[in-house]
Amino acid sequence: MALLNHAPGFTLCRLDGDLPAFLNACAGAGVPVERAAADGRCFVRSSSLPEARALAAQKGGVLSPLQDGRFSRLLTRYRRRVGLAFWPVLTVALLLFSQCFAWRIEVTGLESLDPALIRSVAAEAGLSIGRFLPTLDTAGVAAHIREEVPGVAICAVNRVGALVEINIHEMHTPPALRPTDPCDIYAAETGKIVYMEVYAGQERVKVGETVGKGQQIVTGVTESADGKLRYVHADAAVIAEAKFSHTFTLPLTQTERVYTGETETRYALGLFGREIPLYLPEGAEKAFSALSRALRQTAAFLFKGPGDPLALPETEEPLWEEQRSAGPLTLFGVRLPLGLTTIRREGYHETGRQFTETEAVRTLREAARDWEAENLADAAVLSREEVFRVEEQKGRRVGVLTVNYLAEMDIASPRRVEIVPNPADDQTTAG
């Protein structure tokens, strides 16, 4: 029966007396009464129960509660306290939402590189404290670090909740070859051998033979008189008439920077991966500059004449070269999801330079001479042939100078021999 269903905040009562008179009295006094039945049962607001009983007595009746209204009164007491449910839900929602931001960035796997360098390069790609992670291109950040930081072989950016881990694998240069390390001798260039003297190892070619680049000349694997294999550090002088070429390039159209000497320092506030400039935006700054110039020129023309020095000549707006350095803000030693970016700018103008073919040849010849002084200092250049041409590369004209050399030089290039031990082979010994 619907009358017996519990009504939150109300108490089920029975009236012994004139029910219509009681209901009219309650309506006049503003006492809530619901679900009144012909047998005198009704629901009376729990908080108004004493007043309702007094009204029933005035009409010659008796109002008796049929159930304990304490639970109803408890519900009535807290029915408007939405915060009891709202704030816990909101707190959990905020905690979950906070996991969408980067609150900590860790760099792992480093051996010689500086973690601060990795973090600064990552910030250039958009990864910084407070960054909204769902919009972060982790693959793009990793690629930017590989491109900008020398010595990074592999980079992976992983997200674990609010933690972003940058895992680095550095490049390892092969250790220098020691005099005791087993090695072979290979040809560094293609050429005809004119002189060879082997100090250690077993020769594979003879004087007068032509060898290709990368071909083995002397092996460090030798056999002793008793048939045992020995690994030695091969050493030889191999002089050959080597033929090789080297190419030098120069774009014929170049843009050069001419610095004006103007410098500026600006600041920006980093918040959740975005920068809030603490300076006028570029467009507004240009608008104010243009308005100031126009007002000054108008005043000069009206009051002094067009020749007055107040009428400033038109000048080209400088371009700016920027250097950014970002650092986190802390409060009592706790890092905040805020950062301060310092932007140092230096003004410059761009001027175009067009090289003629004669100028390009002269410039490329100077580059070739510098390269030869560094790389062919110990070689005797027998012949040298230059070939110059102009090519279209990526939509621009490029001067290309190819120099073909014939040089008498030492082409011996040692290469380590990797020895894989074989316990079953007791005939192998290291020399």
Image (tube, rainbow, N blue to C red):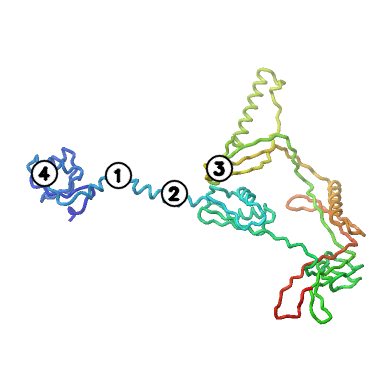
Q: Mark 1 points at which residue?
A: 80
Which label's residue is closer to the chain start, 1 or 3? 1
Q: Which of marks 1 and 3 is in front?
A: 3
> Amino acid under label 4?
Pro
Residue 270, image x, y percentages: 56, 43
> Amino acid under label 3?
Leu
CA distance separating discs 3 and 4: 73 Å
CA distance separating discs 1 and 3: 41 Å
* 190 vs 326, nearest the viewer: 326
Q: Quadrant of residue 258?
A: top right
Q: In this view, does 395 lie to the left or right of 237?
A: left
Identify whether 202 is placed above or below 125: below
Residue 117, image x, y percentages: 64, 50
CA distance separating discs 1 and 4: 32 Å
Residue 334, image x, y percentages: 52, 45
Q: Name the residue under label 3.
A: 329
Which label's residue is closer to the chain start, 1 or 2? 1
Identify whether 417 is placed above or below 170: below
- Residue 20 bears which disc, if any? 4
Which label's residue is closer to the chain start, 4 or 2? 4
Q: Nearer the viewer, mark 3 or mark 4?
A: 3
Residue 8, image x, y percentages: 23, 49
* 307 vs 80, nearest the viewer: 80
CA distance separating discs 2 and 3: 22 Å
> Amino acid under label 2?
Leu
Q: Name the residue under label 2.
A: 94
Q: Can residue 60 be seen in this view?
A: yes
The crowding category of the residue bearing disc 1, from other C-alpha atoms within 10 Å (few below 14, some 14 to 19, many at least 20), is few
